[in-house]
Amino acid sequence: MHPTSLMARIAQLQNGETSSEQLVHEALQNAQAAAAEHVFTHLFADAALEQARLADAQRRALASGSQLGVMHGLPITIKDNFDVLGHTTMAGTVVCEGEAVATQDAPSVARLRQAGAVFLGKTNMSEFAFSGVGINPHYGTPRNPSDAAVARAPGGSSAGAAVSVALGLAVAGLGSDTGGSIRIPAALCGLVGFKGSQSRIPLQGVMELSRSLDTAGAITRTVPDSLWIEGVMSQQPLRASTAHLRGMRFAVPQTLVLDELEPAVAQAFERALSRISAAGAELVDIPFTELADIGPRSLPGGFSPVEGYAAHHARIARAPNRIDHRVAARMALGQGVSALDYIGLIDRRRAWIAQAQAVLQGFDAMLCPTVPLVAPELAPLLASDDAFFKANRLLLRNPSMINYMDGCSFSLPCHQEGDLPVGLMVSSVNGQDAHLASIALALEPLISP
């Protein structure tokens, strides 16, 4: 099953070039291949084939196809922190074993089911979604498909979601993004990741890490694909058409986001900026020194540790030795944080968002590398906590700023074909999703490999 866009699969199904059963059968076969090892924590093999056969029968019965759902018969994957009816939501951990099964789908899952999507299975992830690297010591770590010779990190936390799409097993991988967990693996695997404004897609039925920062979304192969599935999940499709770049103004921050760039990332970023400028857009270097204030404003723990510890403290207490020590160490930063400190976090964030919106006023979007490095080799990160935490810090640094801002953001591939993937992050403030989507539609053919 070759990697093909969602929109192309829709056309193939409508034209009779393939069937849902064929797509799902091939995907399930390929899910057993070595390249897909550790991608899934649970395969819905029998149910997926049954869904696919039903979808094909419905398509045959409705010649016009006018009554079919917009995702009818398309295989997708679901990150392991979303509720699926009849299954325990594990969120990449083992401490949830024995907990009650979900009595209903998460709303975003239910909407996809209603639209006719076929669920292949639940995908592997960083435990509790608390890492940008994608390593999972309980279920193994999916290998990044971008390098056949060297095992590289897939990016996290939506690691299996990204790899499932990169391998062509699914047209989309449902994921969550608290500090880049959709955009980081998308960037490292050469895919499109879209983190919309938090309020667009309901978070009910998604196991919480940080209620202030969590966002639901999907990883896809193209921008049109991302808008298609986001419209289903949000039930409020974005009115976006390809923007005219000439005359647009893009901010290029100079604080933090360009620090420690690997040469391959720096070259891809400069090449992308050059093409955008040649298309008639104005690129403006801005200090945006406020980005450096996020760290100090997040003391003493930061939203993810504080809210994550509040959400999972009972599980941690129940089985502290069954949790990845790297995750436990970060969760522990939230232990003992007072209500006074927590309210201070909220107030300082609200004030910072107002400052950031003022800085970005008058710009159509902000541009920077999604992450400052290409997919790191996996072995050193497995062997060394120091190497892991350094890579994790760098991977999370740029995308997490957009979550703190409650903005909207795309990661778009901008590397040259044959090179390791690099992502361009295109971002804006809260509520500008439709305008940003129009920009992403224009940028994708300009900068994509």
Image (cartoon, helix red, strand yellow):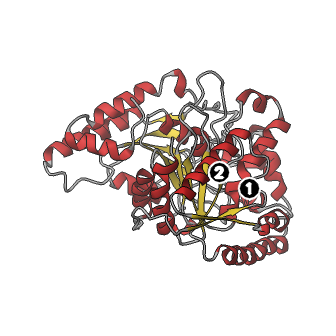
| Residue 150, position as x, y percentages in the image | 66, 24
Q: Is residue 208 left or right of residue 221?
A: right
| Residue placed under numbered mark 2 in the picture | 370
Q: Secondary structure at mark 1?
A: loop
Q: Earlier in the sequence, mark 2 or mark 1?
A: 1
| Residue placed under numbered mark 1 in the picture | 257
Q: 398 or 415, which is in the foreground?
A: 415
Q: Residue at x 41, y 25 (%)?
A: 29
| Residue 207, position as x, y percentages in the image | 60, 54
Q: Is residue 227 left or right of residue 153?
A: left
| Distance from the alpha carbon under mark 2 to that under mark 1 | 9 Å
Q: 54 or 438, which is in the foreground?
A: 438
Mark 1 is on which residue type?
Val
Q: Is residue 312 visible?
A: no
| Residue 401, position as x, y percentages in the image | 70, 61
Q: Secondary structure at mark 2?
A: loop
Q: Residue at x 54, y 21 (%)?
A: 34
The mark total stands at: 2
Write down the quadrant of residue 252 in the picture. bottom right
Decide: is 115 above or below 43: below
Q: Residue at x 30, y 38 (%)?
A: 52
Q: Residues within 10 Å of mark 1 (few under 14, many from 20)?
A: many
Decide: is 248 above or below 210: below
Mark 2 is on which residue type?
Thr
- Image quadrant containing the N terminus: top left
Marks 2,1: beta carbons within 8 A: no
| Residue 250, position as x, y percentages in the image | 60, 65
Tag of residue 298: none
Write down the quadrant of residue 30 in the picture. top left
Q: Is residue 253 visible?
A: yes
